[in-house]
Amino acid sequence: MMDRRSLRLLVIATTALTAALLLVDDSTPARILVALAFALVMPGLGWAERLRLRDRGDTLLLAVTMSVCLLVLVGEGMALLRVWSVPGAFVVLAAIALLGVGLPERFRLPQRLRSRQRGPWVGRAKVPPAARADRSGEPGEARENQAAAGRA
Amino acid sequence: VRNSVSQEAGTVYRSTLTLGQHDEDVVADPSAQPATGIGLVRSDEGRPGFPPWRDDLWAVVTVLLAVLLWVTGIWGADPRSMTDIGLLALFTVPMVAALVILTLGFFVALRRAAPEWVLAMHLVAFIALIHGTPPALFETLRYGWSWKHLGIVDYILRTGQVDTTISALQVYHGWPGFFAGTALLTELIGRSRLEQLATWTQVAFNLFNLLAARFLLRSLSEDRRVIWLGLWFLFVTSWLGLDYFSPQGLAFPLYMVLLGLLVRAYRRPRRDGRRPPGAVMSSRVAVPVMVLLMLVIASSHQITPLMMLLALVAAYAVRVTRGWYIPVLAVVLTVGWAFVVARGYTLDHLSGLTIGKPVQNGVDTFEKSASVRGGQVLVSYGGRFTTAAGLAVALVGVYQAWLRRRLDRLALVLLLSPALCLAVTEYGGEVLFRVVLFMGPLMAYFAALAIYPEPAQTAQKRRAVTGVVVTAMVLPAFLLGYYGKDAHNYFTPAEIRGVGWLYEHAEPNAVIVVGSRNYPQRFRNYEKFVTLSIANEPEDSRNRVLADPPERLSRWLDAGPSNKRGYILITRSQKVGNDLIGPMPVGALDQIEQALRGSPRYRVAVDTGDAVAFVLVPEERKP
């Protein structure tokens, strides 16, 4: 799993690059790749990472899902309210993306909730809180859970 | 640490979970712990002198070989030479070999419990080959109705808004999520890229489906074989082609993610205290994402919100999920959107709901293919067989799970809930297709359970062979159903150029008479024209046109709402479509074109070879 600093750098770099390509009205294939990566992944990436799902595929899925949903809602809102503005939409999406990786760690799920991520029935199984966060069972997840709990 | 040895694969497997966690799992529910699952990975204690990475390397080589064979087999093919079985007519021996290799490679990897990336590689290759071939070969957007969706995006790009009171294609303005999102994405990547973006959307949506379905199946099972075999079955039975550039294509993966979150966060605890299978998540973490999903689904499509409501309400009603506010939120958002933002369309069409007529609604779907001819009859049966076979195997899975007292009631409810939609609407004669689409992921899950009903690692070879046999049975029918209609779903660049010219040069409010609706339709300035389709007229009206096309069609043009010059547009795909699926006799549109070309009352406005537009000469127009 990508560490938080690398994630932050990735989101900031992609957002900045997209802004630059939009400003110079670039029409090269690079714009397609960068803008697609920005619009379809970045707005949700930081927020998906905060969910601490422990599975890269699930984290990527929720990053894409949230990004697509935000893209749709921003576009829909502008079209319905008749305030269509590409720079405005970009600023909103960029702000959401940057907040996702920029807000302090305490905005992540509170410890009290994280320790209950397995649901109420788990309590009976006497599972250590760090091991409960996700029972998907990916190799090494328990160690990552413990490390995450330690950081918090 | 519990070890299990697969003699057939010659590989030793070992849990890599920490001892404490693993022990707790066993204490919590001994029966729920699979012998081979996500938590189990191959160890380094495999066959002496045969390092485990070599199996993975062989898997990479076989996938590359399959891709190479496929590309070699299709290279240089001419889409114009497709016959009445569509793209299947262009299949070559290397392409068939590629599918055989990919299938065998997948099941070998599944049997030896290969790492997830190896299994994923096979499915990504399958998606790239199957869904990437049409855009790569055709280089144009598939399906006539996709072009209509481009028209709505074009409207938003031109005007910066949607109009929920518009008369033309009002439904899309009432649920504009997909179109507004696409318009915004197009602005970001460059307006000139819209058609290119739309052409490749089908591949992107299928990759999205792969991730979303994996998320859903991982919430139902921890057995990696069940998860990946379920994904395999999902993609080899998804013949409907509803993953195209459309609101449905976007809403379907979102629906699967929503169900995955529901299962992970809101599944009720078992009465016996055993922990449920699959990954779990806190409801407080899941609910903001679920609300976001519900809002987008409710504002982007008409039938997906209905499917969503049915699933959420049914799951709560039969007490397999908790959280009363989840179905309530879904109802509020769906009904609220329909009666606030899209109220114009909703109020006008409420009477069109066919509530309480499930049989009739289902029959309406079958009637849509009643007029097909030649190879299209086979294509029609190919699709039906794929679904029937998938359902049959899934029923075996349900029975196997019931026999072992492992039947997951929540999964069963999610499998059956889409069928309730049959009792509500015919959805333009397509409801059965949509029901099959939404049942797909759970059908695939139960089909995988039919092959792997036990977590125990027994009879691996026999089970893998059974999976291969099921695939061999379903795959040809899938290809027939999925590719079989491509002869009329393909549009040549010359055809698109001709239609585009017309949409650029026709005056606002002009009448455009088309042979049928199977052409790259209404993709530019769509709201400015009135379109009439000969094929969609009642039979007696069509027959009058065929009896004397110049005379009858001149009346149509004169009967338009304005005195603007009208056009008659005949294209290659209209002819191919009519000749394959009707409703007019074979060659009817050729006959009309020849009659118009020979009539002194008409002249050709544009002719690109694959699209020709006629106009009445000036003296023939009404004053």
Image: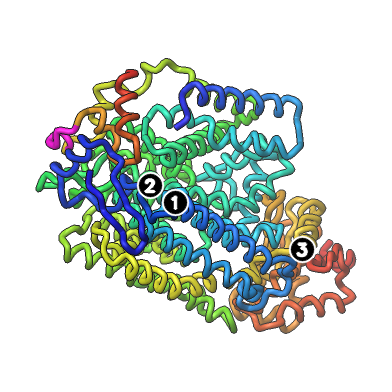
**Residue at mark 3 to residue at mark 2: CA–CA distance:** 59 Å
Pick the front one: B453 or B370: B453
Compared with B45, B552 (above or below) is: below
What residue does disc 3 label?
A: B495
Q: Which element is circle 1 on?
A: loop
- Residue shown at 74%/43% (left/top)? B192
Compared with B188, B594 (above or below) is: below
Residue depth check, mark 3 versus mark 2: number of the one nearer the observer:
2
The quadrant in which the C terminus of chain B is found is bottom right
What is the chain letter for disc 2?
Answer: B
**Residue at mark 1 to residue at mark 3: CA–CA distance:** 56 Å
What residue does disc 1 label?
A: B51
Query: Label 3 crowding class (10 Å Cα cut-off): few <14, some 14-19, many 20+?
Result: many
Amino acid type assigned to the residue bearing label 1 in the image: Pro
Q: Which element is circle 2 on?
A: loop
- Residue shown at 51%/74% (left/top)? B476
What residue does disc 2 label?
A: B44
Residue depth check, mark 1 versus mark 3: number of the one nearer the observer:
1
The span shown in magenta is A122-127
